[in-house]
Every structure is written in C-alpha cells, then in structure tokens.
Image: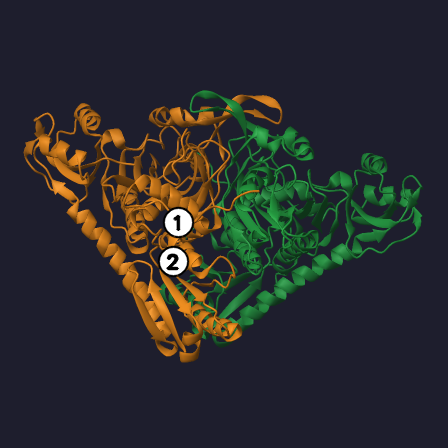
Chain colours: A green, B orange
Amino acid sequence: MKQPFEKRELKKKSENLSDWYTDVILKSELADYAPVKGCMVIRPYGFSIWEKVQEIFNGLMKTKGVQNAYFPLFIPLSLLEKEKEHVQGFSPELAIVTIGGREKLKDPLVVRPTSETIIYAMYAKWIHSWRDLPMLINQWNNVVRWEKRTYLFLRTTEFLWQEGHTAHETEKEAMEMVLTALDWYRQVYEDYFALPVVYGIKSQSEKFAGAKATYAIEALMPDGKALQAATSHNLGQNFSKPFDIHFQNREGKEDFVWQTSWGISTRSLGGLFMAHGDDNGLILPPKIAPIQVVIMPIFQKDRESVISYCGQLKEVLTNGGIRVHIDNREEPSVGRRFNEWEIKGVPLRFEVGQRETTDRSVTVARRDTGQKVTLTRDQMLIETEKLLVTIQGQLFTKQKEFLTKNTHDVDSYEGFKKIMETSRGYLRALWCEDAVCEAAIKKETKASTRCLLLETKNEQGACIHCGKAATHRWLFAQAY
Amino acid sequence: MKQPFEKRELKKKSENLSDWYTDVILKSELADYAPVKGCMVIRPYGFSIWEKVQEIFNGLMKTKGVQNAYFPLFIPLSLLEKEKEHVQGFSPELAIVTIGGREKLKDPLVVRPTSETIIYAMYAKWIHSWRDLPMLINQWNNVVRWEKRTYLFLRTTEFLWQEGHTAHETEKEAMEMVLTALDWYRQVYEDYFALPVVYGIKSQSEKFAGAKATYAIEALMPDGKALQAATSHNLGQNFSKPFDIHFQNREGKEDFVWQTSWGISTRSLGGLFMAHGDDNGLILPPKIAPIQVVIMPIFQKDRESVISYCGQLKEVLTNGGIRVHIDNREEPSVGRRFNEWEIKGVPLRFEVGQRETTDRSVTVARRDTGQKVTLTRDQMLIETEKLLVTIQGQLFTKQKEFLTKNTHDVDSYEGFKKIMETSRGYLRALWCEDAVCEAAIKKETKASTRCLLLETKNEQGACIHCGKAATHRWLFAQAY
C-alpha cells in the first residue's frame, strides 16, 4: 500500500536552507517533481499564487494600455537566426521538434525560449505608421530553456512567465517603458511579496542576448545569495533592423521602431518562498497568500454550534474581502492539522472551540510570530484587517533590515573574498568594467556583477581586482 | 513602402461563408497567420474574448471546487504509451522533441496533445485514500496536434484550451461530473455566445481515444455543418488501471479511481465568429464582446465640448459596468471608422456630434439590425443595458430558429442524401450502431454521426443505410 506523504518531519531552515526549501515546497503542496527531467508540476496551492501575480500584473499593465495576446509556441530555426547575438545566446538551451505528424521536418521548430523573433515577424506586418505606435503587447505563456536538474521554481526546463513586447517611435519613449516595467516588477516584489529589491543595469556580459541594455530587479536570499527576479530590456533597434519593422514617422520619413521586452517568471515565486519562512514552514505575506485566514473548529461536545459559529465568522470575513478557509476535517488530529497550515504558511489561524463559541470570540494565532490574541466577534473583522496589514509590513521590514545589514562597500579584494567566503551578501565595489576582470572575480569568488544601481554616482578610484581606473561602484553577489 | 491592410473591401458572407470567415477574422484583427505552418497568432482583440471565456469558465468551475494547476508541456513517449487506445488515437498528430540542450534525447518528448497521461502519473502519487477524493483539477494551457493547413481558430496545430481532470470514488459520481462539465459548456455557448447547442453521447468510432464514453456539445453553422464545440469524457477506470491510481475506499479496501476529463478550446471561438455576423462583419453577442459600446465623437466645430461630453457618457456607462471605448482618432474618416467597428462587431455605436452635445442626447446604432434610436442622457444607462440584453436575446432566438428549421427526422436514405447535398443541417435517423455502416454513410454523404441526444427515446425500426434493426435515432451532420 502507498504511504501518504509524511508531513511532520519538515527539514529545518536553520540547519540547511536548500534542503528545507525543497522539502517545504513539496510538503506544502506548492509543487512536485514531474516524470520529465528538468520539469515540475505546479499544484493548485502554488498555482493560485501565480494566478494572483497575474491578476496584480495585469492590473499594472492596464494602467499603460498594454494588451494581452498569444503567439505560437514554435519558432522556425531560420527565424530565430535573424538576430545573431540572440540565437548565439539561446542555442545551448534549445529544445527542438524534428518530427511532426509522423514526418521529419525540413525546417526544425524550436520550442520558444522567449518570443522576440516570432512576435517581431508579426510587428513587421502590423506596423506601418507612427499612428500604429506605441504597440504594447504582452503574453502569458510557457517557455523552454533546457536544464538537466530541477531546482523547484528556481531552475526548470519549462517555466511560466509573461513577456511584454513594445515598439515605439523614439528611444526616449522606449526607455520610459523599460523603466516603467522595472518599477512594476519592484511593486510586485516589494508591495506584494514583501521583499525589498535592488534594481539597476546589468553589465555587458550579463545582459539579455540581443539587447542594447538589460535592467533587473534582484532580491537577497537568506544565505546571502542574490536572485534575479525580473528583467527589462532596452532592445534599441537591434531587432527592428533585421526584422525590418519600419514605419512612417511624423515627418513622413521611414524609420525603424525602438523596442523593449520585459519578463517575470514563476522563478520569482522561488524567491518569495525561500526568503520568508522558518523551521515550521512557509510564511506567506498576506497580500499574496491564497488563504489569509484558516478557521479551525475544535470540537469537544457541541459540534453543531461550533461549526455554525465558524460559518458565521467565515461569512463576515469573506464579505470583508478576506480569503478564508474552514478546516473541518475529522482527520488527522488537530495538532497535525495545525502543523499542516503552518507548513503552508497561512498568515492567521483562528481557533474556535466551545469557549469561543459561547463567548462570541475567537483565538487568533499569527504564523510569523506565533503570538496569540483573543478577539471579540464585533471587533474581529477590523482587527483581522489590521493584523494582516501589520504582518505584511513587518515581513517587509525584517527583509529590509536583512538587506541593509548584508550590503557592504568594500575597497580591498581581500575583504571582498573574505565576505564571499562567509556571510556573502551584496558588495559594492569599484570595477573597471572589463569583462576579463569580471570573469576572474567570478571564478575566484563565485560572485558576479549583479547590477549598477540606477542612483549610483560617478566615483574616481581603482578596480577592486586589477587596480585599473574605475568610475562606478557595481553591486556584486553570488547568485542563484 | 508597406501598404496598410485594406479594410473596406470585406468579402461577403452572403456569397461565400468560408472566404468571408477568414477575411473577417483577419480584418477585425481577431487573429493572423503566423510564420509557422499550421499556427496562428491570437491578436489582442481576439485574446480578450478568450480571457472572457476563461473568466466565465473559472467561475463555473469554482461552484464545484475545481482548482487550477499546471502540468508540464512535455510527455515522455513511454508514458503516453501506457494506455494503448490513447496513444494509437494520438500518434498521427504528435510533434516530437528529439534534441534538447544540443544533445539527442534517448527518450523523445512528445509536445502534449492532451495531458491525461502526465497528470495521471501524478494522481497515482497524490491519491491514497477516499479522503483525497474527489480530486478536481483543471489547467489552462496550449496543446499541439499536427495540422498542415491552418483554418483560423477552427483548425490549428497549436491551440489553447482548458482540460479538467477529475478522480472519484464511484462511477456514479464521475458520471455526474461528466454531465456537469457538459452543462457548463452548454452555458458558455448558449448564455454567452448566444448559440444554441445539441448535446449527447458520441458513437464508439467518434469518441476520445481512451475514453469509455464521450459526450459533446455541438453547434450548427450557417452552411448547415456542425461544429463540435466541447467534449466531456467518462474515462471509467481505463486510465486508473494502467496508471495504478488506487485508493483505500470507505470500507478499507483498495480500489481504482473513476475518472473524467473535459475540455473547451479556442476552436469554440470559431463557431462564435462564424455563426453570427453578416456582410458588414462580425456581430458579437454583448455578453462576450470586449467592447460593448463604441463612442464616436463627430466634430464640426466645438471639438472640446464634444470630447468632454463623450467622456461624461463613458464614465456613466463604465460605472454601470458596461465596456466602452471612445474612438477619437483623427484618421481615417468617420465613415471608414464606422466600417471598422462594424467589422469588429461591436454591439452598439454611439454617435455624438454638436447636436447631441447641445441636446444632452446620444444617437445609438445597433450593429445587429442597423436600427437607430436617440436616447437622452438621463435614460441612457438604463436604455443601453436594455438594448444589450435585447440584442443578446434576439441573436440567440435567431440561431435557435435556424437550428430548428435545419433539424429534420428522415426515414429514407434517398431523403438523407438529398438534404446533405443541398441545405445540410442535422438529420435524425435510425442507425444500427455498426461502425461499418457509419463509415459507409460518411463516405457517401460526408455526414458523420454527431451524437445520440441525451433525451432520445428507444424506437423500433430499420437502419437508414443497411435496413438492419435499429433502436435509436442518431443525429447526423457534415462537420467542421
């Protein structure tokens, strides 16, 4: 006989972050390994968080008139090859369909790793005049970049994302779009995931294959490693020229459009799950939690009155816009079910027994701090709302403190190496902007350039590695 | 220089349905051909209709507790082969990935044509006891079934759909789910698409590969051909046995689960576009139309007051929950823009000129009938709501009349053939239920069995083709 998954023995975050991360994702039923190498299954609990991200991001995109559409999964290899740097960057990661309808294909089809080429072939057809611009299109889809080993959410062959693709009359307008998208990502991470980010421009060697410049937001994980959470690219005219996306401008002359693309994927959820959480399981920020309150009826004798009272509480909370679930299962034991909801990271647990039913009250336990308070039914809705806001804020503050504490200016390579061997974190160091130097630092310390923060001021100094002249302090970190 | 798409010369529905259908889909910007054989691009206007279907169907599924999840795009060929009838049915249509990450794959990966096998491999892992049942999971995704020629929406290699997959303790419960899903599809088609459907069980030769029985809803197109709009399958234990999805039942014994799967795809939108509409373009039923009202400011002199008045109208309608767009482009001409919105099938056009602005009124033109009425600003919201309801109802009634008029009982094969050569439509005829006879009828008349209507009563008679004993009157039609 098959054995149900053992939920109690969760691995400890305080002992091994990576083991805990995989274990908590499986046991909270966010996701599971699939019977296909490199792939995962996103289970309903995890998928409902992704649906929340979609809802939030669709709302943000709507403010600027970005519209959703759908482009094909398959890209003819010949089309992908039109932008040289682009195909070079992606070719090691491609999955290729060579057989279709029992026949060998003459022009093999690439399973999209990203959709610039197929979308821009259409833009060339659709864009004629400045009146057609800006063209602001997004798609939510699945993309494939070959991986041999799965790291749940963080590294999978197939992942879900959105990819925004815009075309503009001027580079100035395109740059505004690049930064607007970057700020939308910052909002998703900071305002919903309760994770502070840094954001800036990537170095030439770290940029998107085919972009003129790549901007990214990055979050810091509990082990001091950075996670690139989303990227936004200024494509310049790098694609519009080979794809011949030209238009008649306001002066009646032909010009090539200026383009951007930007994306956030299910990878970003990995950061959310890894950053918060403790030895007891996930801790989901209330704004993104599929269930914000779990109501646990605890029976001694008068089962019906407890159940009925729980139903009333649920109705009040639901009408107040709070996402509630009543757990009235008879098995497993109450203690075991408490553990399950802790593993799942539900922000608030309402305990309702005979006493609470008689008193018209409820005992509320916070997932993040473990604190318990008793609320009367009359004050319940408003106090619950306050608690959810408080938790959201405190989770962010805690992460912000962690980020600040683990961001250092360093001016000696010895100091740089020492920190990378111990606590890690972000190091702000002068770098000469030579890719050779960047590669050497990465080889010696595992730390890569993460970005040049947008607000970074010019500085005169020596590169931390080679000592040559450097003008900017870049952000370095080891990264996922 | 590129030429903008010529919008005015729309092909006539009254002359050639098929030419009109393709032309109106391209010119209304619902979709476009992609630079990949067999594939299409769903443009923002078309995709927003699909998003509406998703919203409606998510709402219906929620009433029964079906949850969304995501399973991998790729299925190892070895997994697909576990259910013999299933793999036989799909193997002519498969797209197969043989190269991944620059290496030839030992076990080639099939791009999912449907996800029974990959999902049920997970169900075997997740289901242990009757307490885990019913398991009710749905996914919205893309699937691939090889096609050489594209017929926009109706036949494409890749299409979007939802696939629901459920597991139950008993066959009775599974059958309830099969019929519930079928009724959800009926609701989507009848209540939103304004298209009456017939629904029933498919013949053995027309059923889903691997199912015990397939149920379908079908709509009748203007040329008298049927369109299978959605299907719902009773899988029995056909998959749970080879995939070993067993559970401990309430009596403590091991049993295999009873399963269902059901889907509706972007193909269903093809029926929506083809059925309604006339020589001037699409006619979208208000409940599914992305834009229900287009406001057209018509300037003579006092441009600002007209624009400002249009803004007020939009605000009132939007606050009333109506989807509104103001077309204040300066080009092309007003007449040309009228044509554009007619092609796009927007249910109501509001014309607002100097006179309307001064009178605080609006001139409203109906897309379906061309009728014009003048509304005062005070009665505008309520009258617009009424008009939208009226249009929705009248579109349905018109289609219902067409369906009734084109459904005939026939008792002679000569009569059967004659109708199939002329007006087509649904023919209800006695059939012996022998697949050989079914194939002969199809070869001779192009008409296939569509379904056995659920309410069909037993009858004693002779098969319309071979004259052998027959007990049921089946529905026959030529089909897309």
Count of number-bearing discs: 2
N-terminal of the pair, mark 2 or mark 1, is: 1
Give me the disc on residue B66: 1
Q: Nearer the viewer, residue B240 or B284?
A: B284
For disc 2, the marked residue is: B346
Q: Picture coordinates of residue B281 (x, y %)? A: 35, 51
**Kind of residue indicated by mark 2:** Val
Seen at 82% across and 41% down, the residue is: A421
Residue B369, visible in the rendered structure: yes
**Kind of residue indicated by mark 1:** Val
Q: Nearer the viewer, residue A351 or A434?
A: A434
Q: Picture coordinates of residue B31 (x, y %)? A: 44, 44
Q: Secondary structure at mark 1?
A: loop
On screen, residue A68 versus residue A210, left or right, reads left
C-alpha span from label 2 to label 1: 33 Å
Say which quadrant the N terminus of chain B sits in: top right
Q: Picture coordinates of residue A201 (x, y %)? A: 75, 49
Seen at 48% across and 39% down, the residue is: B71
Residue B132 against residue B480 in the figure, above or below: below
Q: Secondary structure at mark 2?
A: loop
Residue B171, visible in the rendered structure: no
